[in-house]
Image (cartoon, rainbow, N blue to C red):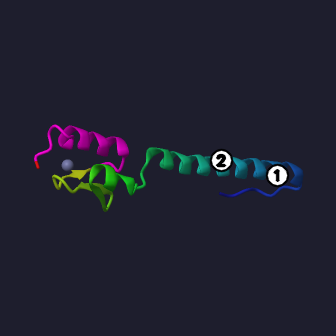
Amino acid sequence: MIFAVHKSSNFNCNLVSKISNLMRSMSSSKKQKIRDEGRMFNDEWFVKYYVVQQNEKALCLICRNYIACLKEFNIKRHYNSRHSENTREF
Ligand SMILES: [Zn+2]
């Protein structure tokens, strides 16, 4: 990003600090969003749902199928629909 330098430096300083604040808040909200989406593999999921992380996916150790999203919602749904107490095959 290029900022033109003028002699009215006060105006520029304000503008630069405004933009840098804006960029900082944008990048922090982006990080927040990633954390909220639960992209990180959670070790608890191994204990709760018998899945391990494989690349960008979760591998179910019970049926050896991949769960495409590293989200607890998807993993939990997989576990509940296929491996809940009533439908467990072993
Ligand atoms: Zn499974």
> Is residue 24 shown in magenta?
no
Eyeballing the image, is 80 above or below 44? above
Eyeballing the image, is 65 above or below 83? below
- The answer to whether the beta carbon of the residue marked 1 is less than 8 Å from any atom of ligand 1 is no
SS at mark 1 in the image: helix
SS at mark 2 in the image: helix
Q: Of the residues tagged 1 and 2, which is closer to the observer? A: 2
- The image shows residue 40 at horizontal and vertical percentages of 42, 55
Asked if residue 60 lies left or right of residue 21, the reply is left
- Residue at numbered disc 2: 25
- The answer to whether the beta carbon of the residue marked 2 is less than 8 Å from any atom of ligand 1 is no
Asked if residue 32 lies left or right of residue 81, the reply is right
Name the image quarter holding the N terminus: bottom right
Q: Which residues are magenta?
A: 68-89
- The image shows residue 3 at horizontal and vertical percentages of 73, 56
- 55 or 50: nearer the viewer: 50
Q: Quadrant of residue 59?
A: bottom left
Amino acid, disc 1 = Asn
Q: Residue at x 50, y 49 (%)?
A: 35
Asked if residue 80 lies left or right of residue 11, the reply is left
Q: Residue at x 29, y 59 (%)?
A: 52
- 22 or 4: nearer the viewer: 22
- Residue at numbered disc 1: 12
Amino acid, disc 2 = Ser
- The image shows residue 47 at horizontal and vertical percentages of 32, 54
- The image shows residue 76 at horizontal and vertical percentages of 30, 42
How busy is the neighbourhood of tag 2: few (under 14 within 10 Å), some, or many (20 plus)? Answer: few
Marks 1 and 2, how far apart in space? 20 Å
Eyeballing the image, is 59 above or below 72? below
- 68 or 19: nearer the viewer: 68
